[in-house]
Image (cartoon, grey):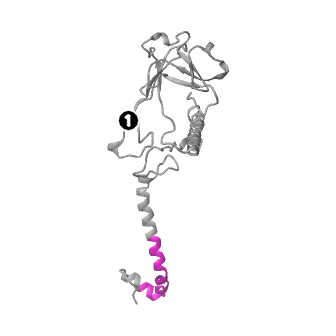
């Protein structure tokens, strides 16, 4: 007798003498399937790092449609969904900051990004404005915040070829400012630079004027006095 494909003569003769030939014939397909499964999973482990991020339950994908989300502003319902989406994102960021930046924690939520936190340095700085009088210096000192170089792949988790990766750095100076350069806006959008010229209860926004913007707006920024649509957060 001879087993199909048997290349071990002594082993095959032993099987024939002991009556194991029939059992081996029946079990051979299962053995081949098991061996193939082991080989496939072994190969898969070698390539896991190419598709799976150790930071958490996130896959590394390559797709031509990857990019920023767009808004169809012509549909009111989509605008509401868009605002709600970003409000949820801000709230999630606020929770992440409290859990992963404010203190030491082993929360699983702090493992969802490539790095638990992005570090920065802080030091005293000069007033960043040409008119140094805009900075309030009484009991205050302007500070400079510097993130250093942040790797788009290793720290931000943006999956890109090596040639397309970037180093990002954020450097900014913060200081309390004089608020005398301001005007007020009512619910109709009418501007009043003297609060005495309008009913204070009708004021909806306050515009501050510290220099023009590239967008063409006269105000450097506006503050809405009504309930905020966006949920904010602060890093401590």
**Residue 177 is covered by the magenta coloring:** no
Give the side of residue 109 with respect to residue 22, left or right.
right
* Picture layout, residue 235 above or below residue 34: above
In the image, the segment drawn in magenta is 13-35
| Residue at left offset 47%, top offset 82% | 24
Label 1: element kind: strand
Residue where numbered disc 1 is placed: 167
Q: Quadrant of the C terminus?
A: top right
* Picture layout, residue 135 above or below residue 226: above
Front one among 170 and 177: 177
| Residue at left offset 48%, top offset 85% | 20
Q: Position of residue 88 (x, y in %)?
A: 59, 41
**Residue 22 is covered by the magenta coloring:** yes
Front one among 100 and 74: 74
Q: Quadrant of the N terminus?
A: bottom left
Q: Position of residue 117 (x, y in %)?
A: 51, 35
Circle 1 residues within 10 Å: few <14, some 14–19, many ≥20: few
């Amino acid at each position: 007798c001879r087993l199909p494909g048997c290349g071990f003569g002594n082993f095959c003769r032993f099987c024939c003498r002991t009556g194991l030939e029939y059992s081996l014939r029946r079990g051979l397909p299962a053995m081949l399937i098991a061996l193939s499964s082991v080989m496939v999973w072994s190969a898969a482990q070698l390539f896991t790092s190419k598709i799976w991020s150790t930071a958490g339950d996130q896959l590394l994908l390559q797709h031509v449609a990857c990019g920023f989300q767009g808004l169809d502003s012509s549909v009111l319902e989509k605008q509401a969904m868009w605002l709600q989406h970003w409000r949820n994102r801000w709230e999630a960021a606020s929770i992440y900051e409290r859990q992963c930046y404010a203190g030491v924690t082993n929360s699983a939520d702090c493992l969802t990004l490539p790095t638990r936190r992005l570090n920065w340095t802080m030091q005293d700085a000069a007033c960043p404005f040409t008119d140094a009088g805009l900075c309030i210096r009484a009991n205050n000192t302007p500070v400079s915040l510097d993130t250093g170089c942040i790797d788009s792949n290793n720290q931000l988790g943006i999956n890109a070829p090596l040639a397309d990766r970037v180093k990002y750095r954020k450097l900014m100076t913060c200081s309390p400012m004089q608020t005398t350069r301001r005007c007020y806006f009512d619910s109709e959008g009418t501007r009043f630079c003297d609060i005495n010229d309008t009913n204070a209860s009708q004021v909806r926004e306050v515009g501050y004027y510290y220099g023009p913007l590239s967008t063409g707006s006269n105000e450097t920024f506006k503050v809405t006095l009504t309930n905020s649509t966006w949920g904010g957060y602060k890093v401590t």
